[in-house]
Image (tube, grey):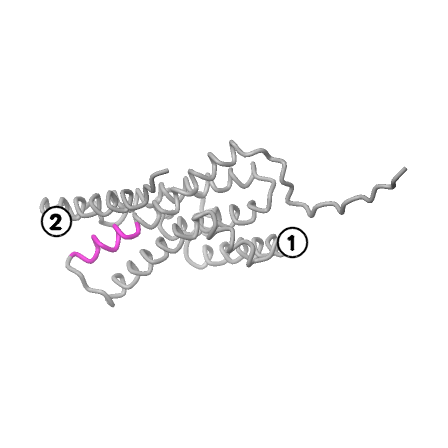
Amino acid sequence: MIDTLPRTVFAALVTNLVVIASVIASGRHDVHAENALFENIQAVCLIFAAILYAASSLRNKSTERVELVGLALLCFSFSLREIDFELIGLPQLIEQLLIGNGRTASLLVLWSGYLAFLLRQPVNLSELVHRQFDSGLSRYLFVSAGLLLTGALIDRGLLTPDHPRLFEELLEVNAYVLLFIPAAKSIVTSARKPQDNSIEAPEPDRATVAD
């Protein structure tokens, strides 16, 4: 099978360069303003990625459920950062749980619950990490983390390119798209995969008595 990775990377680079050139040439910097096109793309990618990872975890009875739940929670956590829930008009109680100190407390509870869930599973951390490298998921996660880190450096003024807001928001768009792609793959895989690998510890082999 022909490796499509170089062509995919090339296509992504060309697309980003075209977007950057188009925005600068046209002066349409409103697309990366607060709550504008770029941020809306980020929010959609994160929400759908969280939903797809969660749906995959419900369909998956193997130890892969652990990482799927973690990825769903990761995308949901990012979505809380990117979406301005105070502008949506949610009930006040729900809004308080999703913004400011309430958001911090909500995430602390959710991640603590995930840690408790993780510790109860018959799988160790090294196995999870090894499986992510084998599946290629680690590539998406590392590149996404690198893009977000670069965007954070621009946001804090440690990197100062021309049009910093454009580059910061575009880096985040790319990062969240990279989280969405394996989410879409995971739901397809879980739909095709036989659900015969139980997450429970296997029963010991029974001894047979010879006649």
For label 2, count other residues whose C-alpha is less than 10 Å away and answer few (under 14), some (14-19) or many (20+).
few
Q: Which residue is mark 1?
A: 120
Location of residue 183 by image quarter: top left
Q: Residues within 10 Å of mark 1 (few under 14, many from 20)?
A: few
Q: Please give left or right for residue 10 compared with residue 100 in the image.
A: left
x and y, in percent, of residue 119 in the image: 62, 56
Q: Which mark is residue 25?
A: none
Magenta part of the chain: 163-172
Which type of secondary structure does the marked residue at label 2 adopt?
helix
Residue type at numbered disc 1: Arg
Residue that extends furthest to the left in the rendered view of this protein: 25
At x 52%, y 49%, the residue is: 67
Are the residues tagged 2 and 1 within 8 Å (C-beta)? Answer: no
Q: If the image is split into quadrants, where does the N terminus sit?
A: top left
Q: Is residue 169 magenta?
A: yes
Identify which residue is drawn at 28% across, 64% down: 153
- Report the number of numbered marks: 2
- Please provide percent x and percent y for residue 130: 51, 55
Circle 2 is placed at which residue position? 24
Chain-order first, disc 2 or disc 1: 2
Q: Nearer the viewer, residue 134 or 167?
A: 134
